[in-house]
Image (spheres, rainbow, N blue to C red):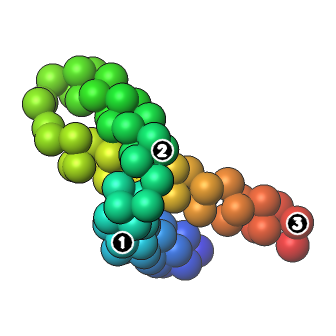
Amino acid sequence: MPAKTGASHALSSFVSLIVGTVLSKYVWTYTPPLAEAGALAGRHLSGLVGTPLSRETTGGFVVVLLLSFLWGVIYHLARDEG
């Protein structure tokens, strides 16, 4: 059982990283207000971590965190339904 759960989490991390990077570039290009909101949230997260990061990095970080969270929620809902 741990192999199945671990593989799902590894896949979600990889997909979130790739899709988050692509979505981050799209968001910065086409929806600057949403990108600024992500950068603001990223600055707060960056302050918690204690490492200064660029606006683009923190915005991408927020997108990846949101995708990972959604993946986890959907995974656990689907797992509990079955």
Identify the residue at image location x=78%, y=59%: 77
Determine the residue located farthest toward the left in the rendered image.
Answer: 52
In primary-sequence order, the first of circles 3 and 1 is 1
Q: Give x and y (percent) for residue 25.
A: 32, 64
N-term mark: 2 or 1:
1
Q: Are marks 3 and 1 in contact (CB under 8 Å)?
A: no
The percent coordinates of residue 72 (x first, y second) are 60, 57
Residue 27 appears at what percent x and percent y? Answer: 42, 58
Q: Amino acid at mark 3?
A: Glu
Q: Can you identify the residue that label 3 sits on?
A: 81
Q: Secondary structure at mark 1?
A: helix
Q: Residue furthest right?
A: 81
User: What count of labels does the image hold?
Assistant: 3
Q: Which mark lies nearer to you, 3 or 1?
A: 1
Q: Nearer the viewer, residue 46 or 36?
A: 36
**Residue 5 position (above or below residue 38):** below
Q: Quadrant of the N terminus?
A: bottom right
Q: CA distance from mark 3 to mark 1?
A: 31 Å
Q: Which residue is mark 2?
A: 34
Q: Which residue is mark 1?
A: 22
Tell me if residue 65 can be seen: no
Q: Is residue 3 left or right of residue 28?
A: right
Tell me if residue 62 comes above or below residue 9 in the rendering: above
| Near-viewer residue (73 or 82) | 73
User: Is 17 placed left or right of 8 in the picture?
Assistant: left
